[in-house]
Image (tube, rainbow, N blue to C red):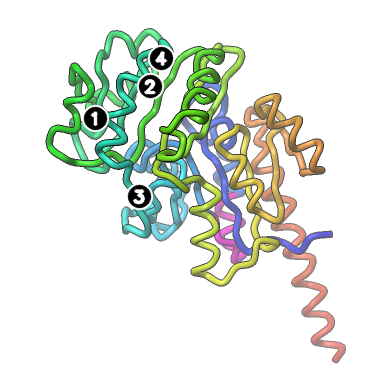
């Protein structure tokens, strides 16, 4: 049996959050705090940018120093906003992507590491609303429309990431085309799929960026070994993080292809996001940590 982890990295959407709603359940919140109280470092690892993720995590009561890996590993900060790492997508690469991505019928969004309007840039709000209306409503005050999208880079400021969303087939085609083109050497891609909604999101990042790479940098700084790390996720953008962690855990509601990979590799599964699967795992971890601590205390007394 694996020893209790020293660090647990947890995804947000489809993992901590329920399928409908933006409030982390009381049980999940309590489990996060119990893990923290047991001396386990909790890390939030999400495809969301910091401004979109922090309001969800703040109410859990986790420490302000909690590390948040955001934008799929491009930016790492604490919950209170202290910078740790940041990587940028070169301006010329971002500009070159604009006409390419239009071919696949998706909607392209670029994210800049700034606060306020223009943090998110789209070419047409009307086009985006048709696909992800709830996302538009939640982010409206940060979104700027620039048409054509190439003009978003006229100032010379580089984005932290691009994102194109559309139907599953279209985004798979976009990923395959980019991967086999010259552009494939200039970017990193991570796909998130929601088959029941026929919606897929293809995140386009600076080369070498992923949740897994960011988690690896953090672990190296802190002297934590891979086998001492647990990661919990549900989608393809969690794959590198799950592969890096010595104790990968996949949600019961995981994307079918990710679930297949997890079964083939013998990874652990937990309950779905709507059944507080994160809490189920964390409760077991904390209980195990307590049992081991009790045994060690007893051994110290007898010796």
- In front: label 2 or label 4: 4
Q: Residues within 10 Å of mark 3 (few under 14, many from 20)?
A: some
| Residue, disc 2 | 135
User: Picture coordinates of residue 30 (x, y %)?
Assistant: 58, 48
Residue found farthest to the bottom: 303
Q: Earlier in the sequence, mark 2 or mark 4?
A: 4
Q: Which mark is residue 106?
A: 4
Query: Distance of mark 2 from mark 3, alpha carbons?
Result: 24 Å
Hey, which quadrant is residue 172 in on the image? top right
Is residue 303 on the magenta stretch? no
User: Picture coordinates of residue 112 (x, y %)?
Assistant: 26, 38
| Residue, disc 1 | 142
What secondary structure is marked by label 1? helix
Magenta highlight range: 32-42
Is residue 34 on the magenta stretch? yes
Q: Earlier in the sequence, mark 3 or mark 4?
A: 3
Q: Earlier in the sequence, mark 2 or mark 3?
A: 3
| Residue, disc 3 | 87
Q: Residues within 10 Å of mark 1 (few under 14, many from 20)?
A: some
Query: Distance of mark 2 from mark 1, alpha carbons?
Result: 11 Å
Query: Distance of mark 3 from mark 1, alpha carbons?
Result: 20 Å
Q: Earlier in the sequence, mark 4 or mark 1?
A: 4
Residue found at x 39% / y 43%: 206
């Amino acid at each position: 049996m694996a020893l209790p982890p020293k660090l647990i990295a947890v995804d947000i959407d489809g993992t901590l959050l329920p399928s409908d709603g933006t409030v982390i359940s009381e049980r999940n919140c309590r489990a996060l705090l119990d893990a923290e109280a047991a001396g386990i470092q909790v890390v939030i690892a999400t495809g969301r940018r910091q401004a979109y993720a922090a309001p969800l995590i703040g109410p859990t009561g986790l420490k302000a120093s909690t590390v948040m890996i955001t934008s799929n590993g491009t930016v790492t900060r604490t919950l209170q906003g202290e910078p740790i790492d940041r990587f940028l997508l070169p301006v010329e690469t971002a500009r070159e992507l604009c006409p390419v991505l239009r071919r696949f019928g998706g909607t392209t969004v670029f994210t800049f590491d700034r606060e306020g309007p223009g943090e998110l840039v789209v070419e047409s709000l009307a086009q985006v609303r048709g696909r992800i209306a709830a996302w538009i409503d939640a982010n409206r005050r940060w979104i700027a429309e620039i048409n054509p999208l190439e003009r978003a880079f006229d100032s010379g400021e580089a984005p932290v990431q691009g994102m194109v969303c559309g139907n599953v087939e279209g985004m798979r085609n976009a990923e395959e085309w980019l991967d086999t083109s010259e552009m494939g050497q200039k970017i990193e891609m991570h796909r998130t799929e929601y088959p029941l909604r026929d919606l897929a999101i293809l995140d386009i990042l600076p080369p070498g960026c992923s949740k897994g790479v960011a988690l690896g940098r953090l672990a190296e700084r802190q002297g934590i070994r891979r086998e001492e790390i647990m990661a919990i996720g549900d989608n393809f953008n969690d794959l590198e993080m799950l592969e890096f962690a010595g104790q990968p855990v996949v949600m019961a509601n995981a994307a079918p292809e990710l679930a297949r990979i997890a079964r083939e590799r013998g990874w652990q599964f937990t309950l779905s996001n709507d059944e507080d699967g994160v809490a189920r795992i964390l409760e077991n971890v904390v209980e195990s940590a307590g049992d081991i601590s009790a045994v060690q205390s007893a051994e110290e007394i007898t010796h």
